[in-house]
Every structure is written in structure tokens, then in C-alpha cells.
Image: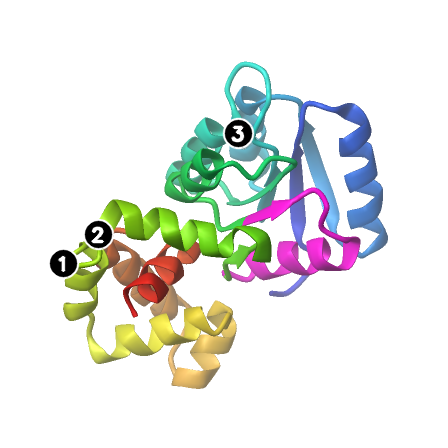
Amino acid sequence: MNGSVRVLLADDHAAIREGLRIMLETHGLEVVGEAADGAVAIRNAAALHPDVVLMDLRMPGVDGIAATREIVASGSAEVLVLTSFDEDELVDGALRAGAAGFLLKTTDAATLVDAVRRVAAGQGVLDPGVTRRALALIARDDGPVAGPATHGLDHLTEREREVLEGMRAGRSNGELAADLGISVATVKTHVSSVLAKLGARSRSHAVALAAGDA
């Protein structure tokens, strides 16, 4: 995407926010705001319209999962979860709330910066340590036969299948537009249709559903 990626930091620890701000700004990203709890994150996302909210999950008051759900539903920003905890219920809850990515705080700076850029470009990112568990959670809920993904894949058009394959390959909306010879706006329309047909709440959720069904 053109221009600097604009990021909102949501974490209840001021020292962590400061460290993230320094890290991101050193790598050319723009931190446009901060939040120490989910309620403030929701308000600031609506007011500032960042490209990405870097979201902790365990915060006082409104937690990160509830905040993610509200921010994604309102269209204020994409959400990339960055947390110390990888319990199944948190991974599952974050993806179902619509998070475009899930990383652990043990992630190195280069990987985190790359993930923020990828999420801002419309891609999904999952920490390698939680990918298999995310797929297992989805498979558990959907069942091995005739789950939502099975029916959804059956109803995808040829173009939607091409878009889904591009999503699985980690292609951004701009890259998909160039690959398929269509506009970015048309790509976004196809992505929305794929998500709706698969019953997915985010690109990463759609990719996980499709991979689990394969």
C-alpha cells in the first residue's frame, strides 16, 4: 500500500506500548495513537482510522477480543493480535472476532513489522506456533463432514476460487488485482463474497477454513 502504515497500539502496559512505538517507528511505521484498555481502543480506532490496531487480548474492562469484534464490525481498522498468551480459547476467540492476524510477544521485530505491513495490505498472519491449533479448533467446530467451509467452497465462483487461492498464498489485494487483471475494488468485493460464503470473519479465518477442508 502507498504511504506509511498507520498503527494504533492497544496494551495495558505503558512500557510495552513505548517499546512497540520505538520499534515500529524505527522501521518506518507511524504510530497514531495508544490505548490502555479495549474501550479506549474502540474509541480511538473510530476517531483515528488507523490501518492496523496492534491488540493485546488481556486488558482491564473491555478485553481485546471484545474490542477486536467491535473494531472489525465497524470497519475502523484491521486488527493484529499481539499477546503473551496462546490458550486455545484466545486463539479461537480472536479469529472468530475477526482478527486478521495472531502473533505472540516473543515474535522478533522484523517479523512483527512485516506482519503489520501484511495485515495493512489485506493479508492474514498467524504465528507458526498457533496455526495448527487454529486449524484444529475450526475443524472441531465445523466437523469433518459437511461443515460450513464445505458448503461454502461448493458455492464459490471460479473467480472467487482464484481469489481464495491468492489469499492462501499470502497475496495482498493489490497483488491479486495485478495477477487477475481486475481492480483492487473488485478484489475487495470478491474477498467479501468469499468470507460470506465460507462463514468466515476475516481473511485468516477464511484461509484456515479452506485449509482445514482440503
* Left or right: 169, with 59 as reference point: left
Q: Nearer the viewer, mark 1 or mark 3?
A: 1
Is residue 59 within the magenta segment?
no
Residue identifier under label 1: 146
Q: Nearer the viewer, mark 3 or mark 2?
A: 2
Which amino acid lies under the numbered mark 1 shown in the image of this protein? Ala
Which of the two discs, 3 and 2, labels the residue nearer the N terminus? 3
Which amino acid lies under the numbered mark 3 shown in the image of this protein? Gly
Q: CA distance from mark 3 to mark 2?
A: 28 Å
* Left or right: 11, with 91 as reference point: right
Q: CA distance from mark 1 to mark 3?
A: 32 Å
Residue 34 image position (x, y, % from top left): 69, 30
Q: Quadrant of the C terminus?
A: bottom left
Is residue 116 within the magenta segment?
yes
Q: Are marks 3 and 2 in contact (CB under 8 Å)?
A: no
Q: Which mark is residue 143?
A: 2
- Which stretch appears magenta? 102-122
Around disc 1, counting alpha carbons within 10 Å, would you say few (fewer than 14), some (14 to 19), or many (20 or more)? few
* Left or right: 205, with 87 as reference point: left
Can residue 120 be seen?
Answer: no
Residue 139 image position (x, y, % from top left): 30, 53
- The answer to which of 134 and 126 lies nearer the viewer is 134
Q: CA distance from mark 1 to mark 2?
A: 7 Å
The residue that appears at 58% across and 53% down in the rendered structure is: 129
The residue that appears at 78% across and 24% down in the rendered structure is: 14
The residue that appears at 45% across and 84% down in the rendered structure is: 179
Residue identifier under label 3: 64
